């Protein structure tokens, strides 16, 4: 009896010692994250991953975010920048450790190799986390960071997992792990699971296996069959992806060109300053974003675009009306002079923006609901900003169609452009309609600029990049016809994108230009030529 | 009669003007600034114009050069390559400048080169370029390929760089990317990389729709080998490229992108949160910590009157070039081109990069090479650098057609592109 109790006590003591040794080990490893060489840091991260202690997660996340610093006495701390000083926190329990001057602590440097190890370790540590999203991310990351002993960890995680999507991701990762370490039967089973997936990581894994020399003939046969099937499916997915990219490029071209379709297409003004209206729209977006950043709570920043669109419309619309009243109205029916004058205006606007904002690019960030993308059809990447722009373009087109067809302003506008004298006789104030129409075209160009700011540069020469494409779209689609502009922009986008993988970006563009030149020879009035008396004038 | 009167007036006017013109020429040393202030390149070149003005301002505050004030003559070649040549001629012949600081793109440099050689004047060119050139009338203070491209690729091949085995060489379609990629391809092949593991792709200037290119890169990278992108994409096209990359979810730890034309100034136009870890190779980063750099940044902020403006590599190269030229003029005691050129060789400047930059007889500098990772605040964190300065090769040892070519403007070679010395060393 006494002997048994003594044994029990001894066991407890040994267990306690082991636990404390492990605890010391753990803190030691955390401090070793601040080591000098990348090799030592990678070792520490890998050891933390193997230890399986979830308390390491905040420290690893801080390291990966560049917020882990080393103090003079060799410990690591998590920092939160506050002006010139840093607030310090303990890396494990996040207890406050006071403040320090930014020079007093040293940043722990991270490189891509270390980042890879961190993702791998985090994936192991969060595989059994309470949050479903964490588990899903962990399962997906596990696929990229397989090591010799990944399989048992994945098996354990799979046993306890209920969520079907996480289970699916875990199964794929487990199969991938068995691909390299399992028996031949396990490998063949794993290949048949992986063959269903179109993840680019899986494709890369199968490729690596195929390159890896001695394989069992049975495994190799299954592997080759799986790879053939995969390539075929990827080809179709690639085609679908390409088509989407074409539509997306088309929608960007359309947004850039609709404004011109009104000022040039409907009014017949060769408006070389159209590109600068796009640019002003983009700069308005920038200003609105800065105002949001400066004056509104940070949680509002995601909605700055909703304010930018009408703001850009009003600003560029106003500039357009001023331009029409002060320059263009004196030059109607003198296309050469209009062209030179508007070109001059475009240079003035560019230089004005350069003086006010400076010549370097301005940073316009995507709101969080427009960043990133998702996988479609199991392999094609669709980015949110492209999808939103596609939808936005449709809304703008719809609004414009309603405005032109269903409102009295639209009716007046069409009347004036078709037969100015007759419209004047009917009591339509033609001069005012001219100004408003030009303002409408410019305003819509401004809205196009809002969209362009989300995918490209915001710089003084933003307009010069798009002006040629805009004219191309309007002329190709048929001058004076909004439907033509729509079809023209989308078909140019799709043709461009279908040619690009075959011919390359440079030759593709040349081919499209040549095709348009030939097309204009055959049909000088574009895809949708206006018919009737309006076309004669 | 009328013509006679006009000629008389003209003669009178010039007689009146002449003493003034002379007085001015006596009082000041003129330096030309040949950077685009409008057009596509204005975005990058305007900053360099300001850097030269800052250096001029600085030297005048310290008492000028050879007892005279230095005066900057600024012209705008407007990103128009032939106009560069006209403006260079105007600076040298009409304004009588002692030296010109200018050009960014290689095509603009090629355009002014004959002018400088014909009129025997000096150009300081501050931008990284493709090499394959050494003119007696140009001092190249930017990086040659062996000071930027080759070390960057070697870093990616190393353990810390991720042991990359497959390469995408993505560039804008003009001379600098094409030549650099030719050198890189030869270098990679010499390191045993197979032809099917190298993909080379070009896009036009100002390319804005990167969806297909990014999808192609993603597909190329999924062949079972660690892949990296080497980017010689120039100017405006970078912003949409990086935006597309970030949105397509390509992380630096999966497919790192190392760029040769993206610096602090270019990143100012991008939200870098999703780009952390992508790389750039330069000879200088603003984040370098040393007293010379601190003073350089402070001087820049003071001159441009804004704490938000960043410094970058071509600015540092302009700084080095200007200091060296001023030292050479002081040493020669004159601004006469031949004397200044001779004084340039071996000239050293303590550079903001923290190293001593040295001008070699091939008209290129010895500079350190640094690899930086993009950070969330738009700055670079240096992850690797050479132990000391690297001497620039004007001709690449990796190109078969460059075999045996030597650039050395000191005796007995005295040439920028030859396989035998111009003079024989007389021995008795």
Image: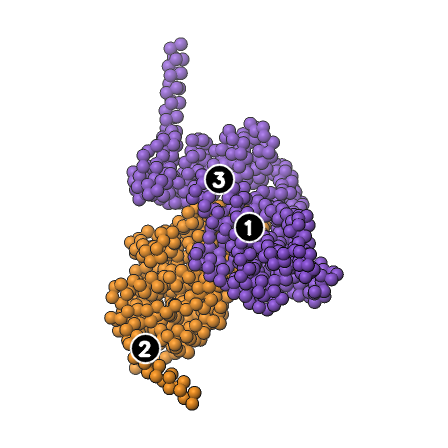
Q: Chain of mark 1?
A: A
Q: Which residue is mark 3?
A: A300
Q: Are marks 1 and 2 on the same chain?
A: no
Q: Quadrant of residue A5?
A: top left
Q: Quadrant of residue A481?
A: bottom right
Quadrant of the image containing the C terminus of chain B: bottom left
Q: Is residue A325 above or below residue A173?
A: below
Q: Which residue is mark 2?
A: B21
Residue B381: where, in percent of width, then height? 39, 49
Residue B154: where, in percent of width, then height? 44, 55
Please give the letter of the chain rendered in orange.
Answer: B
Q: Which residue is mark 1?
A: A313
Structural distance between the alpha carbons of marks 3 and 1: 21 Å
Judge left or right: residue A358 versus residue A531.
Answer: left
Question: Of residues A302 and B320, which is closer to you in this image?
Answer: A302
Judge left or right: residue A482 versus residue B406.
Answer: right
Give the SS element for disc 2.
helix
Q: Are marks 1 and 2 in contact (CB under 8 Å)?
A: no
Whether residue A314 is visible to the viewer of this picture, yes or no, is yes
Residue A321: where, in percent of width, then height? 55, 56
Judge left or right: residue B5 versus residue B186.
Answer: left
């Amino acid at each position: 009896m006494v002997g048994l109790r003594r044994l029990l006590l001894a066991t407890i003591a040994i267990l306690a010692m082991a636990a404390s040794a492990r605890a010391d080990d753990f803190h030691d490893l955390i401090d070793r994250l601040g080591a000098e060489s990348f090799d030592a840091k990678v070792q520490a991260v890998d050891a933390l991953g193997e230890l399986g202690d979830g308390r390491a997660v905040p420290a690893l996340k801080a390291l990966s975010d560049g917020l882990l610093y080393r103090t003079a006495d060799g410990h690591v701390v998590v920092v939160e920048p506050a002006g010139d000083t840093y607030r310090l926190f303990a890396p494990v329990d996040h207890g406050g450790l006071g403040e320090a001057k930014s020079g007093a602590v040293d940043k722990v440097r991270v490189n891509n190799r270390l980042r890879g190890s961190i993702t791998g370790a985090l994936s192991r540590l969060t595989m059994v986390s309470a949050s479903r999203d964490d588990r899903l991310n962990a399962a997906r990351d596990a696929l990229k960071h397989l090591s010799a002993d990944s399989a048992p960890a994945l098996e354990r995680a799979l046993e306890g997992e209920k969520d079907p999507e996480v289970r699916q991701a875990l199964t794929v990762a487990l199969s991938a792990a068995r691909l390299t370490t399992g028996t031949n039967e396990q490998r063949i089973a794993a290949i048949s699971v992986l063959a269903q997936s179109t993840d680019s990581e899986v494709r890369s894994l199968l490729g690596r296996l195929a390159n890896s020399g001695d394989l069992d003939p049975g495994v190799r046969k299954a592997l080759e069959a799986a790879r053939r099937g995969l390539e075929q499916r990827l080809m179709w997915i690639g085609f679908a992806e390409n088509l989407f990219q074409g539509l997306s490029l088309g929608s960007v071209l359309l947004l850039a060109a609709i404004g011109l379709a009104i000022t040039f297409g409907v009014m017949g003004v060769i408006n070389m300053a159209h590109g600068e209206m796009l640019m002003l729209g983009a700069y308005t977006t920038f200003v609105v974003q800065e105002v949001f950043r400066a004056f509104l709570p940070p949680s509002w920043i995601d909605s700055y675009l909703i304010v930018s669109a009408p703001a850009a419309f009003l600003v560029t619309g106003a500039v357009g009306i001023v331009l029409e009243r002060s320059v263009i109205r004196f030059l109607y029916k003198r296309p050469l002079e209009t062209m030179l004058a508007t070109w001059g205006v475009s240079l003035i606007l560019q230089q004005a923006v350069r003086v006010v904002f400076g010549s370097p690019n301005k940073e316009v960030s995507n709101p969080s609901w427009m960043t990133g993308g998702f996988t479609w059809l199991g392999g094609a990447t669709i980015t949110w900003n492209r999808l939103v722009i596609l939808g936005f373009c449709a809304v703008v087109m719809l609004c414009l169609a309603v405005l032109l067809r269903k409102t009295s302003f639209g009716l007046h506008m069409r009347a004036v452009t078709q037969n100015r004298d007759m419209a004047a006789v009917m009591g339509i104030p033609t001069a005012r309609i001219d100004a408003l129409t030009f303002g409408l075209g410019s305003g819509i160009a401004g809205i196009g600029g809002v969209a362009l700011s989300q995918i490209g540069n915001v710089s003084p020469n933003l307009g010069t990049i798009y002006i040629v494409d805009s004219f191309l779209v309007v002329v190709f689609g048929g001058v004076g016809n909004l439907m033509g502009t729509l079809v023209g922009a989308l078909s140019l986008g799709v043709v461009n994108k279908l040619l690009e993988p075959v011919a390359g970006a440079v030759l593709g563009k040349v081919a499209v230009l040549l095709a348009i030149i030939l097309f204009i020879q055959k049909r000088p009035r574009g895809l949708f030529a206006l018919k009737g008396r309006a076309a004669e004038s | 009669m009328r013509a006679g009167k006009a000629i008389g007036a003209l003669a009178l006017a010039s007689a009146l003007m002449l003493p003034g013109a002379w007085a001015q020429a006596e009082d000041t040393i003129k330096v030309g600034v040949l950077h685009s202030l409008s057009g596509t390149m204005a975005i990058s070149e305007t900053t360099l114009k300001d850097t030269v003005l800052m250096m001029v301002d600085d030297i005048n505050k310290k008492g000028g050069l050879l007892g005279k004030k230095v005066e900057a003559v600024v012209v705008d070649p407007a990103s128009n390559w032939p106009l560069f040549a006209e403006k260079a001629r105007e600076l040298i012949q009409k304004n009588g400048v002692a030296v010109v600081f200018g050009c960014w793109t290689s095509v603009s440099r090629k355009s002014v080169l004959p002018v400088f050689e014909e009129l025997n004047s000096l150009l300081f060119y501050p931008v990284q370029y493709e090499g394959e050139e050494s003119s007696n009338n140009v001092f190249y203070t930017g990086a040659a390929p062996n000071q930027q491209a080759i070390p960057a690729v070697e870093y990616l091949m190393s353990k810390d760089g991720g042991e990359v085995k497959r390469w995408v060489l993505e560039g804008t379609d003009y001379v600098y990317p094409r030549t650099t990629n030719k050198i890189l391809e030869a270098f990679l092949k010499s390191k045993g990389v197979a032809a099917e593991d190298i993909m080379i792709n070009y896009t036009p200037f100002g390319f804005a729709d990167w969806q297909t290119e990014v999808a192609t890169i993603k597909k190329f990278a999924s062949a079972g080998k660690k892949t990296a992108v080497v980017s010689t994409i120039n100017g405006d096209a970078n912003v949409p490229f990086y935006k597309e990359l970030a949105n397509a979810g390509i992380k630096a730890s999966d497919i790192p992108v190392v760029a040769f034309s993206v610096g602090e100034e270019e990143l100012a136009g991008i939200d870098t949160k999703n780009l952390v870890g992508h790389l750039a190779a330069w000879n200088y980063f603003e984040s370098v910590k040393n007293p010379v750099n601190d003073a350089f940044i402070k001087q820049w902020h003071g001159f441009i009157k804004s704490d938000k403006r960043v410094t970058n590599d071509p600015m540092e190269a302009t700084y080095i070039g200007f200091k060296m030229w001023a030292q050479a003029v002081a040493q020669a005691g004159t601004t006469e081109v031949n004397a200044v050129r001779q004084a340039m060789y071996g000239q050293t400047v303590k550079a903001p990069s923290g190293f001593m930059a040295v001008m070699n007889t091939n008209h290129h500098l010895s500079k350190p090479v640094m690899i930086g990772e993009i950070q969330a605040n738009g700055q670079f964190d240096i992850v690797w650098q050479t132990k000391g300065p690297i001497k620039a090769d004007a001709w690449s040892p990796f190109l078969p057609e460059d075999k045996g070519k030597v650039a050395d403007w000191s005796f007995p070679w005295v040439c920028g592109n030859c396989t035998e010395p111009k003079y024989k060393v007389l021995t008795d």
